[in-house]
Image: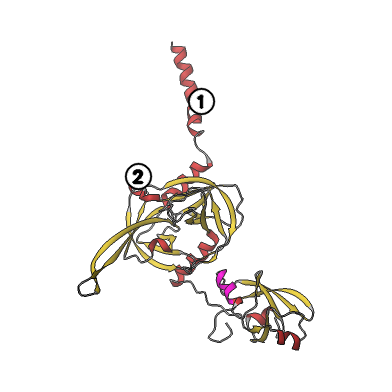
Amino acid sequence: MNKLFSILYIFTLLYGDGISSSRETAITRAIKKVGPSVASINVEQHVSSVSFDPFFGFMYPRNIYPMKSSGSGVVISPDGFVMTNYHVIENADKISVTLSGGSEYEAEIIGADITSDLALLKLEGSNFPYAELGSSDDLLIGEWVIALGNPFQLFSISNKPSASVGIISATNMDFGRLKNGKVFQDMIQTDAAINHGNSGGPLVNALGEVIGINTFIYTGSDNAQGSVGIGFAIPIKSAKRVAKELRTTGHVDRGYSTGLMVQSVTQSISRYLNIPFAKGVIIVEVIGGGAAERSGLLPGDVILTANGEPVNLPNDIRSVILDNDLRSGDKIILKIFRDGDYKKIKMKLGKYKENPYK
Protein backbone atom coordinates (compact mmCIF):
# COMPACT_ATOMS: atom_id res chain seq x y z
CA MET A 1 0.00 0.00 0.00
CA ASN A 2 2.81 2.36 0.92
CA LYS A 3 4.52 1.47 -2.33
CA LEU A 4 1.38 2.32 -4.36
CA PHE A 5 1.01 5.61 -2.50
CA SER A 6 4.62 6.46 -3.27
CA ILE A 7 4.13 5.75 -6.97
CA LEU A 8 1.02 7.94 -7.10
CA TYR A 9 2.81 10.71 -5.24
CA ILE A 10 5.76 10.63 -7.65
CA PHE A 11 3.37 10.58 -10.67
CA THR A 12 1.59 13.66 -9.32
CA LEU A 13 4.87 15.50 -8.85
CA LEU A 14 6.06 14.61 -12.33
CA TYR A 15 2.87 15.07 -14.34
CA GLY A 16 0.40 17.09 -12.27
CA ASP A 17 1.70 20.46 -13.37
CA GLY A 18 1.97 19.19 -16.92
CA ILE A 19 -1.73 18.34 -17.02
CA SER A 20 -2.60 21.77 -15.69
CA SER A 21 -0.22 23.63 -17.97
CA SER A 22 -1.47 21.71 -21.01
CA ARG A 23 -4.69 23.74 -20.74
CA GLU A 24 -2.72 26.91 -21.34
CA THR A 25 -2.38 28.02 -24.93
CA ALA A 26 -1.19 31.11 -26.74
CA ILE A 27 -4.81 32.26 -26.68
CA THR A 28 -5.24 31.93 -22.91
CA ARG A 29 -1.89 33.62 -22.32
CA ALA A 30 -2.86 36.51 -24.60
CA ILE A 31 -6.17 36.99 -22.78
CA LYS A 32 -4.40 36.90 -19.42
CA LYS A 33 -1.90 39.50 -20.65
CA VAL A 34 -4.36 41.99 -22.15
CA GLY A 35 -7.46 41.36 -20.02
CA PRO A 36 -6.57 43.75 -17.15
CA SER A 37 -6.29 46.67 -19.59
CA VAL A 38 -9.72 46.16 -21.16
CA ALA A 39 -12.34 48.62 -19.95
CA SER A 40 -16.09 48.93 -19.80
CA ILE A 41 -17.07 52.42 -21.00
CA ASN A 42 -20.24 53.55 -19.20
CA VAL A 43 -22.03 56.53 -20.74
CA GLU A 44 -24.85 58.68 -19.43
CA GLN A 45 -26.81 61.11 -21.60
CA HIS A 46 -29.72 63.37 -20.76
CA VAL A 47 -32.43 63.09 -23.38
CA SER A 48 -35.51 65.28 -23.66
CA SER A 49 -38.82 63.92 -24.86
CA VAL A 50 -41.24 66.10 -26.82
CA SER A 51 -45.03 66.11 -26.63
CA PHE A 52 -47.67 67.51 -28.96
CA ASP A 53 -50.62 69.42 -27.56
CA PRO A 54 -53.56 68.74 -29.92
CA PHE A 55 -55.70 71.49 -28.37
CA PHE A 56 -53.26 74.37 -28.81
CA GLY A 57 -51.49 72.75 -31.76
CA PHE A 58 -47.87 73.11 -30.67
CA MET A 59 -45.06 70.92 -29.41
CA TYR A 60 -43.31 71.39 -26.10
CA PRO A 61 -40.58 69.56 -24.18
CA ARG A 62 -42.02 67.24 -21.60
CA ASN A 63 -39.27 65.54 -19.63
CA ILE A 64 -35.52 65.29 -19.50
CA TYR A 65 -34.41 61.85 -18.45
CA PRO A 66 -31.08 60.02 -18.22
CA MET A 67 -30.25 57.34 -20.76
CA LYS A 68 -27.40 54.93 -20.13
CA SER A 69 -25.35 52.93 -22.60
CA SER A 70 -22.06 51.09 -22.58
CA GLY A 71 -19.24 50.01 -24.82
CA SER A 72 -15.63 48.92 -24.57
CA GLY A 73 -12.20 50.48 -24.49
CA VAL A 74 -8.57 49.67 -23.84
CA VAL A 75 -6.02 51.40 -21.60
CA ILE A 76 -2.97 52.23 -23.74
CA SER A 77 -0.64 53.87 -21.20
CA PRO A 78 0.19 53.58 -17.48
CA ASP A 79 -0.99 57.16 -16.89
CA GLY A 80 -4.56 56.26 -17.82
CA PHE A 81 -5.18 57.09 -21.48
CA VAL A 82 -8.02 54.96 -22.88
CA MET A 83 -8.84 54.39 -26.54
CA THR A 84 -12.40 53.70 -27.67
CA ASN A 85 -14.78 54.42 -30.55
CA TYR A 86 -16.26 57.86 -31.02
CA HIS A 87 -19.76 56.41 -31.37
CA VAL A 88 -19.44 54.84 -27.92
CA ILE A 89 -19.10 58.23 -26.18
CA GLU A 90 -21.00 60.39 -28.68
CA ASN A 91 -23.18 63.04 -26.95
CA ALA A 92 -22.10 61.80 -23.52
CA ASP A 93 -22.81 64.01 -20.50
CA LYS A 94 -20.89 61.74 -18.13
CA ILE A 95 -18.44 58.90 -18.73
CA SER A 96 -17.12 56.38 -16.24
CA VAL A 97 -14.70 53.55 -16.90
CA THR A 98 -14.68 50.21 -15.11
CA LEU A 99 -11.54 48.08 -15.19
CA SER A 100 -11.07 44.40 -14.40
CA GLY A 101 -11.72 43.78 -10.72
CA GLY A 102 -14.43 46.44 -10.55
CA SER A 103 -12.41 49.62 -10.02
CA GLU A 104 -14.38 52.55 -11.45
CA TYR A 105 -13.04 55.92 -12.58
CA GLU A 106 -14.54 59.08 -14.01
CA ALA A 107 -13.18 59.75 -17.49
CA GLU A 108 -12.37 62.98 -19.28
CA ILE A 109 -12.66 63.24 -23.06
CA ILE A 110 -9.25 64.36 -24.32
CA GLY A 111 -10.33 64.35 -27.94
CA ALA A 112 -12.72 62.71 -30.37
CA ASP A 113 -12.66 62.27 -34.13
CA ILE A 114 -15.89 61.56 -36.00
CA THR A 115 -14.15 60.69 -39.28
CA SER A 116 -12.07 57.83 -37.90
CA ASP A 117 -14.68 56.93 -35.23
CA LEU A 118 -12.06 57.09 -32.49
CA ALA A 119 -11.90 58.87 -29.14
CA LEU A 120 -9.29 59.24 -26.41
CA LEU A 121 -10.23 59.34 -22.72
CA LYS A 122 -8.14 60.05 -19.62
CA LEU A 123 -8.45 58.51 -16.16
CA GLU A 124 -7.13 60.21 -13.05
CA GLY A 125 -4.34 58.20 -11.46
CA SER A 126 -1.21 56.28 -12.37
CA ASN A 127 0.22 52.79 -12.71
CA PHE A 128 -2.75 51.51 -14.66
CA PRO A 129 -2.47 48.14 -16.40
CA TYR A 130 -2.12 48.87 -20.10
CA ALA A 131 -2.04 46.93 -23.33
CA GLU A 132 0.90 46.51 -25.64
CA LEU A 133 0.14 47.98 -29.07
CA GLY A 134 1.40 45.77 -31.86
CA SER A 135 1.62 46.17 -35.62
CA SER A 136 -1.14 45.87 -38.21
CA ASP A 137 1.29 46.01 -41.15
CA ASP A 138 2.15 42.30 -41.29
CA LEU A 139 -1.14 40.57 -40.48
CA LEU A 140 -1.67 37.06 -41.81
CA ILE A 141 -4.95 35.85 -43.25
CA GLY A 142 -5.97 32.95 -41.02
CA GLU A 143 -3.97 33.90 -37.92
CA TRP A 144 -5.73 33.63 -34.57
CA VAL A 145 -7.17 36.76 -32.98
CA ILE A 146 -9.18 37.52 -29.84
CA ALA A 147 -11.91 40.17 -29.51
CA LEU A 148 -12.12 41.46 -25.93
CA GLY A 149 -14.74 43.76 -24.50
CA ASN A 150 -18.09 44.33 -22.85
CA PRO A 151 -20.78 42.73 -25.04
CA PHE A 152 -24.34 43.22 -23.78
CA GLN A 153 -22.96 44.83 -20.57
CA LEU A 154 -21.67 41.45 -19.33
CA PHE A 155 -18.65 43.22 -17.80
CA SER A 156 -20.91 44.39 -14.95
CA ILE A 157 -21.65 40.79 -13.95
CA SER A 158 -18.11 39.43 -13.71
CA ASN A 159 -16.03 42.64 -13.55
CA LYS A 160 -13.85 41.32 -16.34
CA PRO A 161 -14.00 41.36 -20.14
CA SER A 162 -15.54 38.69 -22.32
CA ALA A 163 -13.40 37.07 -24.98
CA SER A 164 -14.22 35.54 -28.33
CA VAL A 165 -11.75 33.82 -30.62
CA GLY A 166 -11.53 33.72 -34.39
CA ILE A 167 -9.19 34.36 -37.28
CA ILE A 168 -8.31 37.27 -39.51
CA SER A 169 -10.59 36.77 -42.49
CA ALA A 170 -9.34 39.66 -44.63
CA THR A 171 -7.29 42.85 -44.47
CA ASN A 172 -7.28 46.20 -46.26
CA MET A 173 -11.07 46.32 -46.44
CA ASP A 174 -11.99 49.77 -47.75
CA PHE A 175 -15.48 51.18 -47.21
CA GLY A 176 -14.65 54.78 -48.14
CA ARG A 177 -16.63 57.70 -46.76
CA LEU A 178 -20.02 56.75 -45.32
CA LYS A 179 -23.12 58.96 -45.21
CA ASN A 180 -22.47 59.75 -41.53
CA GLY A 181 -19.05 61.20 -42.41
CA LYS A 182 -16.99 58.30 -41.08
CA VAL A 183 -14.18 56.93 -43.23
CA PHE A 184 -13.25 53.27 -42.81
CA GLN A 185 -10.09 52.34 -44.71
CA ASP A 186 -7.78 49.31 -44.46
CA MET A 187 -10.17 47.63 -42.01
CA ILE A 188 -9.40 44.23 -40.52
CA GLN A 189 -12.14 41.64 -41.04
CA THR A 190 -12.50 38.88 -38.46
CA ASP A 191 -14.93 36.09 -37.65
CA ALA A 192 -14.31 36.47 -33.91
CA ALA A 193 -17.74 37.28 -32.47
CA ILE A 194 -18.16 41.04 -32.09
CA ASN A 195 -21.50 41.97 -30.54
CA HIS A 196 -23.32 45.04 -29.28
CA GLY A 197 -21.07 46.57 -26.62
CA ASN A 198 -17.81 45.26 -28.07
CA SER A 199 -17.25 48.52 -29.94
CA GLY A 200 -14.05 50.24 -28.85
CA GLY A 201 -12.48 47.10 -27.41
CA PRO A 202 -9.19 45.61 -28.60
CA LEU A 203 -8.62 42.98 -31.26
CA VAL A 204 -5.58 41.07 -30.05
CA ASN A 205 -3.17 38.65 -31.72
CA ALA A 206 -1.87 35.43 -30.17
CA LEU A 207 1.12 37.31 -28.72
CA GLY A 208 -1.18 39.51 -26.64
CA GLU A 209 -0.61 42.60 -28.79
CA VAL A 210 -3.43 44.94 -29.79
CA ILE A 211 -3.69 44.96 -33.59
CA GLY A 212 -7.03 46.72 -33.98
CA ILE A 213 -9.99 48.46 -32.35
CA ASN A 214 -13.27 46.56 -32.81
CA THR A 215 -15.70 48.94 -34.49
CA PHE A 216 -18.67 47.43 -36.32
CA ILE A 217 -20.26 44.22 -37.52
CA TYR A 218 -22.21 43.05 -40.52
CA THR A 219 -25.52 41.58 -39.36
CA GLY A 220 -27.11 40.80 -42.70
CA SER A 221 -30.33 42.50 -41.61
CA ASP A 222 -31.43 45.90 -40.32
CA ASN A 223 -33.20 44.18 -37.42
CA ALA A 224 -30.46 41.74 -36.44
CA GLN A 225 -28.36 42.52 -33.37
CA GLY A 226 -25.79 39.76 -32.99
CA SER A 227 -22.69 38.68 -34.84
CA VAL A 228 -22.92 36.55 -37.97
CA GLY A 229 -19.18 36.07 -38.15
CA ILE A 230 -18.27 39.25 -40.01
CA GLY A 231 -16.75 41.96 -37.83
CA PHE A 232 -14.39 44.82 -38.60
CA ALA A 233 -11.64 46.52 -36.62
CA ILE A 234 -9.70 49.72 -37.22
CA PRO A 235 -6.03 48.75 -37.75
CA ILE A 236 -3.89 49.79 -34.81
CA LYS A 237 -1.51 51.70 -37.08
CA SER A 238 -4.34 54.11 -37.95
CA ALA A 239 -5.63 54.18 -34.38
CA LYS A 240 -2.20 55.04 -32.95
CA ARG A 241 -1.83 57.93 -35.39
CA VAL A 242 -5.21 59.38 -34.41
CA ALA A 243 -4.61 58.81 -30.67
CA LYS A 244 -1.29 60.64 -30.88
CA GLU A 245 -2.94 63.67 -32.48
CA LEU A 246 -5.82 63.64 -30.02
CA ARG A 247 -3.42 63.46 -27.09
CA THR A 248 -1.37 66.38 -28.45
CA THR A 249 -4.04 68.75 -29.76
CA GLY A 250 -7.43 67.27 -28.87
CA HIS A 251 -8.41 66.98 -32.52
CA VAL A 252 -7.22 65.57 -35.86
CA ASP A 253 -5.94 68.11 -38.36
CA ARG A 254 -7.09 67.06 -41.82
CA GLY A 255 -5.90 70.20 -43.52
CA TYR A 256 -3.80 69.69 -46.63
CA SER A 257 -2.60 71.47 -49.74
CA THR A 258 -1.99 70.15 -53.25
CA GLY A 259 -0.66 73.43 -54.66
CA LEU A 260 -2.65 72.82 -57.84
CA MET A 261 -5.19 74.66 -59.93
CA VAL A 262 -6.93 72.43 -62.49
CA GLN A 263 -9.85 72.41 -64.89
CA SER A 264 -11.66 69.67 -66.77
CA VAL A 265 -10.43 68.62 -70.21
CA THR A 266 -13.31 69.39 -72.56
CA GLN A 267 -13.63 68.58 -76.25
CA SER A 268 -12.58 72.12 -77.18
CA ILE A 269 -9.55 72.04 -74.84
CA SER A 270 -8.45 68.64 -76.16
CA ARG A 271 -8.65 69.90 -79.77
CA TYR A 272 -6.87 73.17 -79.00
CA LEU A 273 -4.02 71.50 -77.08
CA ASN A 274 -3.90 68.42 -79.31
CA ILE A 275 -4.73 66.03 -76.44
CA PRO A 276 -5.92 62.68 -77.88
CA PHE A 277 -8.87 62.41 -75.46
CA ALA A 278 -11.44 64.56 -73.65
CA LYS A 279 -11.15 63.33 -70.09
CA GLY A 280 -9.16 64.08 -66.96
CA VAL A 281 -8.21 67.50 -65.58
CA ILE A 282 -5.44 69.70 -66.92
CA ILE A 283 -3.09 71.56 -64.59
CA VAL A 284 -3.53 75.28 -65.14
CA GLU A 285 -1.18 76.53 -62.43
CA VAL A 286 1.36 75.09 -59.99
CA ILE A 287 2.17 77.04 -56.82
CA GLY A 288 5.88 77.62 -56.31
CA GLY A 289 7.25 75.55 -53.43
CA GLY A 290 3.99 73.63 -53.08
CA ALA A 291 3.27 69.91 -53.05
CA ALA A 292 2.67 69.69 -56.79
CA GLU A 293 5.91 71.46 -57.71
CA ARG A 294 7.94 69.33 -55.30
CA SER A 295 6.54 66.18 -56.90
CA GLY A 296 7.50 67.35 -60.41
CA LEU A 297 4.06 68.21 -61.78
CA LEU A 298 3.94 70.88 -64.49
CA PRO A 299 1.32 73.16 -66.01
CA GLY A 300 -0.18 71.35 -68.99
CA ASP A 301 0.00 67.90 -67.38
CA VAL A 302 -3.31 66.05 -67.58
CA ILE A 303 -4.27 64.13 -64.42
CA LEU A 304 -6.29 61.02 -65.29
CA THR A 305 -6.50 59.12 -61.99
CA ALA A 306 -5.75 59.65 -58.30
CA ASN A 307 -5.02 56.50 -56.30
CA GLY A 308 -6.57 54.54 -59.15
CA GLU A 309 -9.84 56.53 -59.16
CA PRO A 310 -10.88 58.43 -62.32
CA VAL A 311 -10.41 62.20 -62.20
CA ASN A 312 -12.63 64.21 -64.55
CA LEU A 313 -13.73 67.14 -62.42
CA PRO A 314 -11.63 69.61 -60.38
CA ASN A 315 -13.26 68.31 -57.19
CA ASP A 316 -12.45 64.65 -57.91
CA ILE A 317 -8.94 64.85 -56.43
CA ARG A 318 -10.35 66.34 -53.23
CA SER A 319 -12.95 63.55 -53.06
CA VAL A 320 -10.22 60.89 -53.31
CA ILE A 321 -8.26 62.62 -50.53
CA LEU A 322 -11.32 62.77 -48.26
CA ASP A 323 -12.50 59.23 -49.04
CA ASN A 324 -9.07 57.85 -48.14
CA ASP A 325 -8.70 60.06 -45.05
CA LEU A 326 -5.45 61.51 -46.37
CA ARG A 327 -3.87 64.62 -44.89
CA SER A 328 -0.66 66.59 -44.78
CA GLY A 329 2.33 64.28 -45.17
CA ASP A 330 0.40 61.48 -46.87
CA LYS A 331 1.11 60.52 -50.47
CA ILE A 332 -1.32 60.28 -53.36
CA ILE A 333 -0.46 58.53 -56.65
CA LEU A 334 -1.44 60.45 -59.79
CA LYS A 335 -1.51 59.03 -63.29
CA ILE A 336 -0.76 61.83 -65.75
CA PHE A 337 -0.43 62.41 -69.48
CA ARG A 338 2.52 64.56 -70.58
CA ASP A 339 4.02 65.05 -74.05
CA GLY A 340 2.39 61.93 -75.46
CA ASP A 341 3.44 59.65 -72.57
CA TYR A 342 1.69 58.32 -69.47
CA LYS A 343 3.47 58.65 -66.13
CA LYS A 344 2.76 57.92 -62.47
CA ILE A 345 3.78 60.52 -59.93
CA LYS A 346 3.67 60.33 -56.14
CA MET A 347 2.66 63.62 -54.60
CA LYS A 348 3.17 64.23 -50.88
CA LEU A 349 0.39 66.48 -49.62
CA GLY A 350 1.52 69.75 -48.14
CA LYS A 351 0.30 71.65 -45.10
CA TYR A 352 -2.89 73.61 -45.45
CA LYS A 353 -2.52 77.30 -46.19
CA GLU A 354 -5.16 79.97 -46.60
CA ASN A 355 -5.26 80.03 -50.37
CA PRO A 356 -7.60 78.90 -53.16
CA TYR A 357 -5.36 76.09 -54.38
CA LYS A 358 -6.41 73.48 -51.86
Q: Secondary structure at mark 1?
A: helix
User: How far across and how far down the image is residue 168, in percent?
Assistant: 57, 50
Q: Which residue is mark 2?
A: 158
Q: Secondary structure at mark 2?
A: helix
- Residue 319 lies within the magenta run: yes
For this rendering, which residue is in front, 202 or 311? Answer: 311
Q: What residue appears at the point 50 percent right and 37 percent down from the top-left corner?
A: 24
Residue type beneath disc 1: Leu
For this rendering, which residue is in front, 250 or 317? Answer: 317
Specify the label residue 67 is tagged with.
none
Quarter in which the N terminus is drawn: top left
Relative to 52, residue 205 above or below: above
User: How far across and how far down the image is residue 74, in percent?
Assistant: 43, 56
Q: What residue appears at the point 63 percent right and 71 percent down from the top-left corner?
A: 331
Name the residue furthest bottom: 272
User: How far across and how far down the image is residue 28, in percent?
Assistant: 48, 41
Residue type beneath disc 2: Ser
In-image side of 252 versus 280 (left or right): left
- Tell me if residue 349 can be seen: no
Mark 2 crowdedness (10 Å alpha carbons): few <14, some 14-19, many ≥20:
few
Which stretch appears magenta? 318-323
Relative to 116, residue 263 above or below: below
